[in-house]
Amino acid sequence: MKIEQSLKLVSVTKPNQQNPVVYRRERLITSINKQLDLINRYRCGEKIRGLWCWIDESGTMFLPIKYGKTVLELSKGKFSIECSSIEEVEDNLEKVKDMSRRGLFDEILKTTSETLRLKFKK
């Protein structure tokens, strides 16, 4: 059997530098994966630190999405996703991860990244 028949071959090589858009997406997805792992550990009863979600006095959970330590503004003046349970937090993280893969967070990530970079310029 020839290689060409068993594999889908393409004439593309890996670029020397990663596209900044792809880098920001992957960074957000990595953070979301860490949050999903923390949620699993939280369910097992472990004492954890760094979980993004928080609960108010009425028992409603809120999930901000963070890029680094910066909370993303998901819509004009809206910084969190309201959730009723830890399962809904997990579902919403999966949705945000999928949306990020499809490029729906690219503009928000670009704006946030540019704002962060301005803080480091002298």
Image (cartoon, helix red, strand yellow):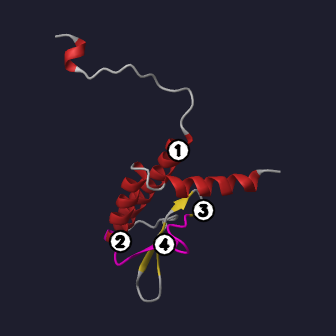
Q: CA distance from mark 4 to mark 3?
A: 12 Å
In the image, taking residue 107 as reference, residue 46 lies left or right, namely: left
In the image, taking residue 59 as reference, residue 114 lies left or right, namely: right
Label whose residue precedes the other's in the sequence (1 or 2): 1
Tell me where the magenta segment starts and ends, as one range: 72-87
- The answer to which quarter of the image holds residue 96 is bottom left
Q: Nearer the viewer, residue 28 or 74?
A: 74
Q: Residues within 10 Å of mark 4 (few under 14, many from 20)?
A: some
Q: Residue furthest top?
A: 2
Q: Is residue 65 magenta?
A: no
Label whose residue precedes the other's in the sequence (2 or 4): 4
- The circle drawn on residue 80 is 4
Magenta segment main secondary structure = loop
Whether the residues at callouts 4 and 1 have beta carbons within 8 Å, the answer is no
Q: Name the residue located 55 percent from the left edge and 75 percent from the top edge.
A: 77
Query: Which quadrant: the N terminus?
Result: top left
Q: Residues within 10 Å of mark 3 (few under 14, many from 20)?
A: few
